[in-house]
Amino acid sequence: MTTDPILSIRGLRKSFGAAEIIRGIDLELRAGERHALIGPNGAGKSTLFHLISGNLLPSAGEIVLDGEHIEGWTPERVNRRGLARSFQITNIFPKLSVFENVRIAVMQRHRLEYNFWRRIERMGSIREATERLLERVRLQHQASTLAGEMTYSAQRSLELAMTLASDPQVVLLDEPMAGMSSEETHYTAELIREVTAGRTLLLVEHDMDVVFSLGERVSVLVYGQVIATGTPDEIRRHQGVREAYLGEEHEA
Ligand SMILES: Nc1ncnc2c1ncn2[C@@H]1O[C@H](COP(=O)(O)OP(=O)(O)O)[C@@H](O)[C@H]1O
Ligand SMILES: [Mg+2]
Protein backbone atom coordinates (compact mmCIF):
# COMPACT_ATOMS: atom_id res chain seq x y z
CA MET A 1 0.00 0.00 0.00
CA THR A 2 1.34 3.41 -0.89
CA THR A 3 0.01 6.70 0.35
CA ASP A 4 1.18 10.24 -0.12
CA PRO A 5 3.74 11.17 2.53
CA ILE A 6 2.33 13.21 5.39
CA LEU A 7 5.64 15.05 5.68
CA SER A 8 8.05 15.51 2.84
CA ILE A 9 11.45 17.17 3.17
CA ARG A 10 13.46 17.92 0.06
CA GLY A 11 16.90 19.43 -0.30
CA LEU A 12 16.74 21.00 3.15
CA ARG A 13 19.74 23.10 4.18
CA LYS A 14 20.61 25.22 7.18
CA SER A 15 23.73 27.25 7.84
CA PHE A 16 24.71 29.14 10.95
CA GLY A 17 27.15 31.75 9.68
CA ALA A 18 29.73 29.88 7.63
CA ALA A 19 28.88 26.51 9.15
CA GLU A 20 26.47 24.40 7.14
CA ILE A 21 24.77 22.11 9.68
CA ILE A 22 21.95 20.64 7.57
CA ARG A 23 23.45 19.75 4.20
CA GLY A 24 20.68 18.73 1.85
CA ILE A 25 18.25 16.46 3.67
CA ASP A 26 15.62 14.41 1.86
CA LEU A 27 13.20 12.59 4.14
CA GLU A 28 9.63 11.38 3.84
CA LEU A 29 7.29 10.30 6.59
CA ARG A 30 4.45 7.99 5.59
CA ALA A 31 1.11 8.75 7.17
CA GLY A 32 0.70 6.70 10.33
CA GLU A 33 4.25 5.37 10.59
CA ARG A 34 6.62 5.47 13.53
CA HIS A 35 9.92 6.70 12.13
CA ALA A 36 13.06 6.80 14.23
CA LEU A 37 15.88 9.24 13.52
CA ILE A 38 19.31 8.28 14.78
CA GLY A 39 22.75 9.76 14.42
CA PRO A 40 25.78 10.85 16.42
CA ASN A 41 25.71 13.88 18.68
CA GLY A 42 26.00 17.05 16.65
CA ALA A 43 24.66 15.41 13.48
CA GLY A 44 21.86 17.98 13.27
CA LYS A 45 18.85 16.03 14.57
CA SER A 46 17.56 18.77 16.88
CA THR A 47 18.26 21.41 14.24
CA LEU A 48 16.18 19.40 11.77
CA PHE A 49 13.33 19.35 14.30
CA HIS A 50 13.63 23.15 14.77
CA LEU A 51 13.41 23.59 10.99
CA ILE A 52 10.35 21.36 10.64
CA SER A 53 8.52 22.95 13.57
CA GLY A 54 9.15 26.50 12.37
CA ASN A 55 11.51 27.47 15.19
CA LEU A 56 14.31 27.94 12.65
CA LEU A 57 14.15 29.18 9.07
CA PRO A 58 15.75 26.92 6.44
CA SER A 59 18.53 28.33 4.26
CA ALA A 60 17.13 26.29 1.35
CA GLY A 61 14.81 23.44 0.55
CA GLU A 62 11.19 22.40 0.96
CA ILE A 63 9.08 21.11 3.84
CA VAL A 64 5.64 19.89 2.81
CA LEU A 65 3.15 18.93 5.51
CA ASP A 66 0.05 17.09 4.31
CA GLY A 67 0.35 18.69 0.88
CA GLU A 68 1.11 22.21 2.07
CA HIS A 69 4.43 24.07 1.98
CA ILE A 70 5.24 25.16 5.53
CA GLU A 71 8.70 26.71 5.10
CA GLY A 72 8.71 30.13 6.75
CA TRP A 73 5.59 29.45 8.82
CA THR A 74 5.58 30.38 12.51
CA PRO A 75 5.67 27.51 15.03
CA GLU A 76 2.07 28.35 16.01
CA ARG A 77 0.86 28.04 12.45
CA VAL A 78 2.71 24.76 11.92
CA ASN A 79 1.18 23.46 15.14
CA ARG A 80 -2.29 24.55 14.08
CA ARG A 81 -1.79 22.71 10.79
CA GLY A 82 -1.27 19.49 12.73
CA LEU A 83 2.36 19.10 13.78
CA ALA A 84 3.50 19.12 17.41
CA ARG A 85 6.93 18.63 18.91
CA SER A 86 8.51 18.19 22.28
CA PHE A 87 11.82 19.78 23.04
CA GLN A 88 15.02 18.01 24.03
CA ILE A 89 14.93 20.07 27.21
CA THR A 90 11.87 19.60 29.38
CA ASN A 91 9.64 22.64 29.14
CA ILE A 92 7.04 22.21 31.83
CA PHE A 93 6.16 24.77 34.52
CA PRO A 94 7.59 23.20 37.71
CA LYS A 95 5.67 25.46 40.13
CA LEU A 96 2.29 24.64 38.61
CA SER A 97 0.29 21.48 39.15
CA VAL A 98 0.19 18.70 36.60
CA PHE A 99 -3.40 19.64 35.79
CA GLU A 100 -2.54 23.32 35.31
CA ASN A 101 0.36 22.45 33.03
CA VAL A 102 -1.84 20.42 30.71
CA ARG A 103 -4.66 22.97 30.89
CA ILE A 104 -2.28 25.68 29.67
CA ALA A 105 -1.42 23.52 26.68
CA VAL A 106 -5.11 22.84 26.00
CA MET A 107 -5.99 26.54 26.28
CA GLN A 108 -3.18 27.44 23.92
CA ARG A 109 -4.78 25.13 21.42
CA HIS A 110 -8.15 26.79 21.94
CA ARG A 111 -6.75 30.31 21.76
CA LEU A 112 -5.47 29.50 18.33
CA GLU A 113 -8.92 28.55 17.15
CA TYR A 114 -11.57 30.48 19.02
CA ASN A 115 -12.10 34.07 20.06
CA PHE A 116 -12.26 35.08 23.70
CA TRP A 117 -16.01 34.63 24.21
CA ARG A 118 -16.15 31.29 22.52
CA ARG A 119 -13.30 30.26 24.78
CA ILE A 120 -15.18 31.23 27.93
CA GLU A 121 -18.13 29.15 26.77
CA ARG A 122 -15.79 26.27 26.28
CA MET A 123 -14.21 26.30 29.74
CA GLY A 124 -16.05 23.08 30.60
CA SER A 125 -14.63 21.34 27.59
CA ILE A 126 -11.16 22.64 28.40
CA ARG A 127 -11.37 20.91 31.75
CA GLU A 128 -12.65 17.72 30.11
CA ALA A 129 -9.95 17.78 27.46
CA THR A 130 -7.32 18.26 30.18
CA GLU A 131 -8.66 15.31 32.17
CA ARG A 132 -8.72 13.11 29.08
CA LEU A 133 -5.11 13.92 28.29
CA LEU A 134 -4.03 13.18 31.86
CA GLU A 135 -5.73 9.78 31.64
CA ARG A 136 -4.04 9.00 28.32
CA VAL A 137 -0.61 9.42 29.91
CA ARG A 138 -1.76 7.82 33.19
CA LEU A 139 -1.21 10.91 35.31
CA GLN A 140 -4.83 11.42 36.43
CA HIS A 141 -3.95 10.45 40.00
CA GLN A 142 -1.20 13.07 40.15
CA ALA A 143 -3.30 15.91 38.75
CA SER A 144 -2.75 18.17 41.78
CA THR A 145 0.95 17.36 42.27
CA LEU A 146 3.36 20.17 41.46
CA ALA A 147 5.01 19.26 38.19
CA GLY A 148 8.48 20.00 39.56
CA GLU A 149 7.98 17.49 42.38
CA MET A 150 7.30 14.50 40.13
CA THR A 151 9.91 11.99 39.03
CA TYR A 152 11.81 12.84 35.90
CA SER A 153 10.03 10.09 34.02
CA ALA A 154 6.58 11.34 35.10
CA GLN A 155 7.59 14.82 33.95
CA ARG A 156 8.27 13.41 30.51
CA SER A 157 4.80 11.81 30.51
CA LEU A 158 3.41 15.23 31.39
CA GLU A 159 5.31 16.77 28.54
CA LEU A 160 3.86 14.13 26.25
CA ALA A 161 0.34 15.09 27.32
CA MET A 162 1.15 18.74 26.58
CA THR A 163 2.49 17.82 23.17
CA LEU A 164 -0.73 15.93 22.42
CA ALA A 165 -2.96 18.81 23.51
CA SER A 166 -3.25 20.10 19.96
CA ASP A 167 -4.35 16.64 18.76
CA PRO A 168 -1.55 16.60 16.17
CA GLN A 169 -1.38 14.40 13.08
CA VAL A 170 2.40 14.44 13.23
CA VAL A 171 4.39 14.25 16.47
CA LEU A 172 8.12 14.97 16.76
CA LEU A 173 9.82 13.74 19.92
CA ASP A 174 13.45 14.67 20.57
CA GLU A 175 15.13 12.15 22.90
CA PRO A 176 12.10 11.61 25.14
CA MET A 177 13.90 8.86 27.08
CA ALA A 178 17.14 10.76 27.71
CA GLY A 179 18.35 10.24 31.28
CA MET A 180 15.87 7.47 32.10
CA SER A 181 16.53 4.11 33.73
CA SER A 182 15.91 1.09 31.52
CA GLU A 183 12.63 0.44 33.33
CA GLU A 184 11.46 4.03 32.77
CA THR A 185 12.64 3.84 29.17
CA HIS A 186 10.57 0.73 28.56
CA TYR A 187 7.51 2.27 30.22
CA THR A 188 7.83 5.50 28.21
CA ALA A 189 8.39 3.65 24.94
CA GLU A 190 5.12 1.75 25.45
CA LEU A 191 3.32 4.96 26.39
CA ILE A 192 4.61 6.64 23.24
CA ARG A 193 3.46 3.67 21.18
CA GLU A 194 -0.02 3.97 22.71
CA VAL A 195 -0.55 7.72 22.49
CA THR A 196 0.83 8.05 18.97
CA ALA A 197 -1.41 5.30 17.55
CA GLY A 198 -3.24 6.76 14.57
CA ARG A 199 -0.67 9.58 14.29
CA THR A 200 2.69 9.85 12.55
CA LEU A 201 5.75 9.82 14.79
CA LEU A 202 9.27 11.06 14.17
CA LEU A 203 11.41 10.10 17.13
CA VAL A 204 15.03 10.98 17.90
CA GLU A 205 16.44 8.36 20.22
CA HIS A 206 19.82 6.93 21.17
CA ASP A 207 18.69 3.70 22.83
CA MET A 208 18.97 1.17 20.01
CA ASP A 209 16.53 -1.28 21.60
CA VAL A 210 13.89 1.46 21.60
CA VAL A 211 14.80 2.59 18.08
CA PHE A 212 14.56 -0.89 16.61
CA SER A 213 11.40 -1.91 18.47
CA LEU A 214 9.42 1.33 18.19
CA GLY A 215 10.64 2.46 14.77
CA GLU A 216 8.90 0.86 11.80
CA ARG A 217 11.44 2.69 9.67
CA VAL A 218 14.71 4.24 10.69
CA SER A 219 16.69 7.07 9.13
CA VAL A 220 20.31 7.77 9.91
CA LEU A 221 21.55 11.35 10.02
CA VAL A 222 25.29 11.87 9.89
CA TYR A 223 26.92 15.27 9.54
CA GLY A 224 23.78 16.97 8.26
CA GLN A 225 22.78 14.33 5.72
CA VAL A 226 20.50 11.30 5.77
CA ILE A 227 22.85 8.45 4.81
CA ALA A 228 20.24 5.67 5.00
CA THR A 229 16.52 5.02 5.47
CA GLY A 230 15.06 1.57 5.92
CA THR A 231 13.46 -1.02 8.14
CA PRO A 232 15.23 -1.83 11.41
CA ASP A 233 16.70 -4.95 9.78
CA GLU A 234 17.97 -3.03 6.77
CA ILE A 235 19.55 -0.41 9.01
CA ARG A 236 21.18 -3.01 11.27
CA ARG A 237 22.77 -4.66 8.23
CA HIS A 238 23.71 -1.43 6.43
CA GLN A 239 27.50 -1.33 6.24
CA GLY A 240 27.78 2.45 5.97
CA VAL A 241 25.58 2.89 9.02
CA ARG A 242 27.57 0.39 11.05
CA GLU A 243 30.78 2.23 10.26
CA ALA A 244 29.44 5.75 10.63
CA TYR A 245 27.28 5.26 13.64
CA LEU A 246 26.59 1.93 15.29
CA GLY A 247 30.25 1.08 15.85
CA GLU A 248 30.97 4.51 17.23
CA GLU A 249 27.97 4.32 19.53
CA HIS A 250 29.23 1.11 21.10
CA GLU A 251 32.51 2.73 22.09
CA ALA A 252 30.67 5.57 23.85
N1 LIG B 1 21.86 28.26 16.80
C1 LIG B 1 23.00 27.66 16.44
N2 LIG B 1 24.06 28.39 16.07
C2 LIG B 1 25.21 27.80 15.70
N3 LIG B 1 25.41 26.47 15.68
C3 LIG B 1 24.40 25.68 16.05
C4 LIG B 1 23.13 26.23 16.46
N4 LIG B 1 22.31 25.20 16.75
C5 LIG B 1 23.01 24.07 16.55
N5 LIG B 1 24.27 24.36 16.13
C6 LIG B 1 25.30 23.38 15.79
O1 LIG B 1 24.73 22.46 14.88
C7 LIG B 1 25.27 21.16 15.10
C8 LIG B 1 24.13 20.18 15.22
O2 LIG B 1 23.48 20.39 16.44
P1 LIG B 1 22.18 19.58 16.83
O3 LIG B 1 21.15 19.79 15.78
O4 LIG B 1 21.82 19.99 18.22
O5 LIG B 1 22.69 18.10 16.80
P2 LIG B 1 22.05 16.76 17.40
O6 LIG B 1 20.69 17.06 17.91
O7 LIG B 1 22.07 15.77 16.28
O8 LIG B 1 22.97 16.33 18.51
C9 LIG B 1 26.17 21.25 16.31
O9 LIG B 1 27.49 21.33 15.86
C10 LIG B 1 25.73 22.53 16.96
O10 LIG B 1 26.78 23.11 17.67
MG1 LIG C 1 19.77 16.91 19.77
Image (spheres, grey):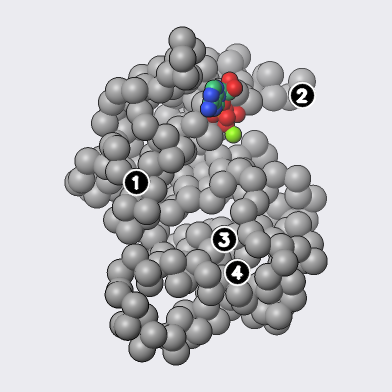
Going by the numbered disc 4, the residue's amino acid type is Asn
Task: Report the residue at 68% width, 70% height from top.
Answer: 96
Can you see residue 132?
Answer: no
Mark toward the start of the polypeptide (3 vs 2): 3
Q: Which tag is nearer the camera, tag 1 or tag 2?
A: 1
Tag 1: Cα neighbours inside 10 Å, few (<14), some, or many (≥20)? some
Q: Assess whether mark 4 and mark 1 are in contact (beta carbons under 8 angstroms).
A: no
Residue at the spot of label 1 = 74
The label shown at residue 160 is 3
Residue 252: image tag: 2
Q: Indicate which label's residue lies in the foreground, 4 or 3.
A: 4
Residue 222 visible, this orientation = yes
For discs 1 and 3, the disc positioned in front in the rendered view: 1
Label 4 vs label 3: CA separation? 11 Å
Q: Amino acid at mark 3?
A: Leu
Is 135 positioned to the left or the right of 3 in the image?
right
Question: Which residue in the rendered view is the most extreme toward the top?
Answer: 18
Of the two numbered discs 1 and 3 on the same chain, state the one appearing first in sequence. 1
Residue 157's place in the image compared with 138, above or below, is above
Q: 151 or 39: nearer the eye?
A: 151
Q: Secondary structure at mark 4?
A: helix
Asked which quadrant contains residue 227, the reply is: top left
Mark 3 neighbour density, 10 Å: few (under 14) some (14–19) many (20 or more)? many
Q: Name the one closer to the observer, 46 or 19.
A: 19
Q: Which residue is mark 4?
A: 101
The three-letter code of the residue at mark 1 reads: Thr
Q: Position of residue 17 (x, y in %)?
A: 46, 14
